């Protein structure tokens, strides 16, 4: 992977320390603290367990001048780019040596030569070598999903877990929802699908901890749509709504969720993409970069890039961070929890 990485535009090694003791009673300090792109330490665990002694944060590509949001979601390595076979791709994961996408779908539109076409939101399995795609699931017993957002695989059971918020409708490219905002479990071998969690303002990212005993699900409900909902751009932040990560016990032999509780609240933006490292630390893409919590839900540090980060993915040396108009790579000591998984299974 390192040999394929282009030369960075800039590389940052700065480490900034946040004084949690001072911030506890100094409101101006807590409110005004900000950092340029750097590593922000809230606990020594961040250095010891996550970034190590020689962290590097590199800006790999930037298209800010053209406002091209090329680095948003579902970053996966592919050897055959340029094929248009997934409608509005969002979350993704490796599955059976291929890439499993959340295709958010679209709405009826005019085709060349007349007529219209529509693609429902679906789990779509893409072979990046051949460029072919296979739909695994596109409805819940006849009712179309709203706009699938993120997906993970339970490698013990083979079941696929995914979230289905209503962002597609609120952004103007999906019809009105016919299902609640829920989390689902799908068994490809039988075609069965179960709703396994609800009660979210807006469910978004999800991941398992390393031993599949816990599941983390983000709620990005503080991003509120308003005005003409079909415009697709009328969004604002409501601070009293969730920017939260919930944790569940994975029960009944890996098939159900129980004992929901609040794990963490994001202080900048919302927690979007989410993943664990091998220690079980929780990483989430937030308003200024990637935030990291230990297994008890304590914020240990941030990898700050100075702008909203929608998602990220681990490789053998660190994480790729997708910050809308910018693509960053961060060299870390920590390793992603899924790096040791055999994706052919």
Image (spheres, rainbow, N blue to C red):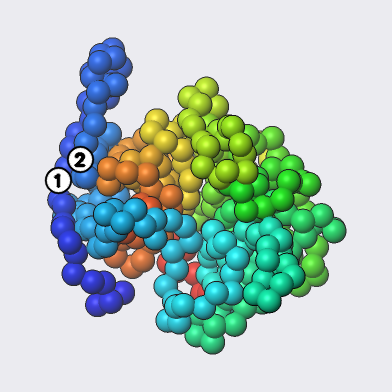
Q: Residue 232 location, x and y as percent? A: 56, 45
Outermost residue toward the front in this view = 113
Q: Which of 309 and 25 is in front in this view?
A: 309
Q: Nearer the viewer, residue 118 or 224?
A: 118
Residue at point 51%, 74% (across, down):
342
Residue at point 80%, 70% (across, down):
190
Q: List the residue tagged with mark 1.
A: 14
As displayed, is residue 80 above or below residue 212? below
Q: Are marks 1 and 2 in contact (CB under 8 Å)?
A: yes
Q: Which circle's residue, 1 or 2, is located before the other in the chain?
A: 1
Q: Quadrant of the rendered structure where residue 212 is?
A: bottom right
Q: Residue 87 location, x and y as percent? A: 60, 65
As displayed, is residue 219 above or below residue 156? above
Q: Residue 33 location, x and y as percent? A: 24, 27
Callout 2 secondary element = loop
Residue 251 appears anywhere in the view: no
The mark closer to the camera, 1 or 2, is: 2
Residue at point 73%, 67% (across, down):
116
Residue at point 17%, 42% (across, down):
15
As displayed, is residue 118 above or below residue 309? below
Callout 1 secondary element = loop
Q: Quadrant of the rendered structure where residue 106 is?
A: bottom right
Q: Residue 18 location, x and y as percent? A: 23, 30
| Quadrant assignment for the N terminus | bottom left
Outermost residue toward the bottom in this view = 130
Q: Dot 2, crowdedness within 10 Å: few (<14), some or many (≥20)?
A: some
Q: Is residue 256 left or right of residue 103?
A: right
Q: In this view, does 104 lie to the left or right of 281?
A: right
Q: Is residue 115 left or right of residue 173?
A: right
Which of the labelled discs sits on residue 95, or is there none? none
Distance of mark 1 from mark 2, alpha carbons?
9 Å
Q: List the residue tagged with mark 2.
A: 36
């Amino acid at each position: 992977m390192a040999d394929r990485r282009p030369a960075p535009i800039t590389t940052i090694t700065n480490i900034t320390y946040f004084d949690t003791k001072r911030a506890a009673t100094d409101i101006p300090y807590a409110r005004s603290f900000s950092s340029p792109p750097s590593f922000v330490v809230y606990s020594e665990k961040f250095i010891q367990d996550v970034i190590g002694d020689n962290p590097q944060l590199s800006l790999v590509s930037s298209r800010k001048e053209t406002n091209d949001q090329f680095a948003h979601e579902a970053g996966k390595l592919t050897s055959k780019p340029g094929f248009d076979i997934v409608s509005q791709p969002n979350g993704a994961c490796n599955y059976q040596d291929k890439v499993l996408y959340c295709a958010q779908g679209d709405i009826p539109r005019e085709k060349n030569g007349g007529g219209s076409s529509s693609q429902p939101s679906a789990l779509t399995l893409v072979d990046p070598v051949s460029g072919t795609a296979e739909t695994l699931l596109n409805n819940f017993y006849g009712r179309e999903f709203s706009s699938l957002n993120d997906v993970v695989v339970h490698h013990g059971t083979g079941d696929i877990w995914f979230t289905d918020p209503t962002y597609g409708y609120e952004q103007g490219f999906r019809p009105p929802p016919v299902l609640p905002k829920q989390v689902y479990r799908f068994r490809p071998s039988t075609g069965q699908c179960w709703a396994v969690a609800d009660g979210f303002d807006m469910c978004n990212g999800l991941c398992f901890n390393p031993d599949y005993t816990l599941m983390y699900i983000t709620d990005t409900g503080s991003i509120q749509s308003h005005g003409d909902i079909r415009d697709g751009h009328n969004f604002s932040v409501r601070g009293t709504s969730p920017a939260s990560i919930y944790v569940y016990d994975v029960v009944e032999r890996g098939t159900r969720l129980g004992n929901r509780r609040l794990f963490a609240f994001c202080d900048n933006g919302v927690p979007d993409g989410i993943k664990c490292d091998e220690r079980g630390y929780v990483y989430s893409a937030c308003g200024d970069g990637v935030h990291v919590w230990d297994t008890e839900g304590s914020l240990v540090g941030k990898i700050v890039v100075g702008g909203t980060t929608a998602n990220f993915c681990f490789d053998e040396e660190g994480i790729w961070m997708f910050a809308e108009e910018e693509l960053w790579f961060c060299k870390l000591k920590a390793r992603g929890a899924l790096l040791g998984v055999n994706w052919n299974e």
